[in-house]
Image: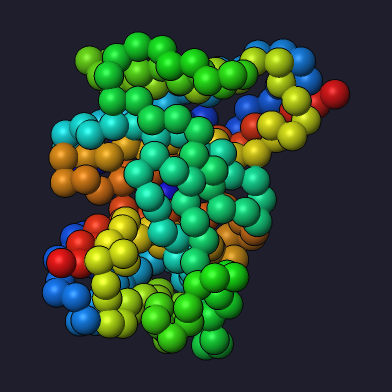
């Protein structure tokens, strides 16, 4: 079956760095997405990786290793507004999105 | 974990026809379901919130007569795109919230339906 795993909850300190991991087993691969979702709001697109390597976008970076079925989202210089759920989703060979359950990130002062 | 399915996964239709997309919560009861539209590499755009047994709440700019939503049971919501046009071609994603579990913030997302209007 298809599966996406990511931690349920993480806690970090304002100003620090946090890495949210995502491992996947899917039938085919057409890219991996990271979304940020604040409570009561629609998910916001953060990144899309289809090739191996690190993609940096401001304070957020996303890494992909297709051979390992692994990705991480790296958040630097954490701010209180970064407290949210972070969703990992993989597009499979049928261009269907397989979603992780999301990681709730709690930022403490 | 909770599973949400969508049917069909992809559909191609002619301009002017109507298309119905189903969203089902497979192992939980969803009093609230959400319908999103996604453009490539962009954020999910909330179209409407569907509550079981009542009328859907549409976001500003979304035509309720064009995008008909029915949430007739605790496990099924449908989105009907009426008189579809090529500009309606998109990836439609639903999500469901399980209130009984007490998880007020958690949404479970479906795999999406790719609509292509010729």
Q: How many marks?
A: 0
Q: Residue at x 25, y 66 (%)?
A: B86
> Does residue A26 appear to the left or right of B79 in the view shown?
left
> Does residue B113 appear to the left or right of A8 in the view shown?
left
Q: In the rendered image, which quarter contains the C terminus of chain B?
A: bottom left
Asked if residue A4 is positioned above or below residue A65 in the image, the reply reads below
x and y, in percent, of residue A49 in the image: 35, 25
Quarter of the image for residue B60 reads bottom right
x and y, in percent, of residue B68 in the image: 40, 82
Q: Visible in this render: residue B80?
A: yes
Q: Visible in this render: residue B113?
A: no
Asked if residue B88 is positioned above or below residue B107 in the image, the reply reads below
Q: Residue at x 58, y 44 (%)?
A: A37
x and y, in percent, of residue B26 in the image: 34, 65
Asked if residue A85 is positioned above or below residue B70 in the image, the reply reads above
> Does residue B16 appear to the left or right of A82 in the view shown?
left
Q: Residue at x 55, y 75 (%)?
A: B58
Between residue B79 and residue B98, name the one nearer to us. Answer: B79
Between residue B48 and residue B72, name the one nearer to us. Answer: B48
> Does residue B69 appear to the left or right of B117 in the view shown?
right
x and y, in percent, of residue A89 in the image: 38, 38
Q: Residue at x 21, y 45 (%)?
A: A95
Between residue B53 and residue B58, name the one nearer to us. Answer: B58
Coloring scheme used? rainbow
């Amino acid at each position: 079956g298809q599966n996406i795993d990511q931690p349920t909850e993480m806690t970090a300190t304002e100003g620090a760095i946090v890495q949210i991991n995502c491992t996947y087993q899917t039938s085919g691969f057409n890219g991996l997405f990271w979304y940020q979702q604040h409570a009561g709001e629609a998910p916001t697109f953060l990144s899309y990786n289809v090739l191996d390597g690190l993609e940096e976008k401001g304070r957020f970076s996303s890494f992909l290793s297709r051979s390992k079925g692994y990705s991480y989202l790296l958040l630097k210089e954490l701010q209180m507004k970064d407290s949210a759920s972070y969703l990992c989703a993989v597009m499979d060979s049928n261009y269907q999105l397989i979603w992780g359950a999301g990681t709730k990130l709690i930022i403490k002062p | 974990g909770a599973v949400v399915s969508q049917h069909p996964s992809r559909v191609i239709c002619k301009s002017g026809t109507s298309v119905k997309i189903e969203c089902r919560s497979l192992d939980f009861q969803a009093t609230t379901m959400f319908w999103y539209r996604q453009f490539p590499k962009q954020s999910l755009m909330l179209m409407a919130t569907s509550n079981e047994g009542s009328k859907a709440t549409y976001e500003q700019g979304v035509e309720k007569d064009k995008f008909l939503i029915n949430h007739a049971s605790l496990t099924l919501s449908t989105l009907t795109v009426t008189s579809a046009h090529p500009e309606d071609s998109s990836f439609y994603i639903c999500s469901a919230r399980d209130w009984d579990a007490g998880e007020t913030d958690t949404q479970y997302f479906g795999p999406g339906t790719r609509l292509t209007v010729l």
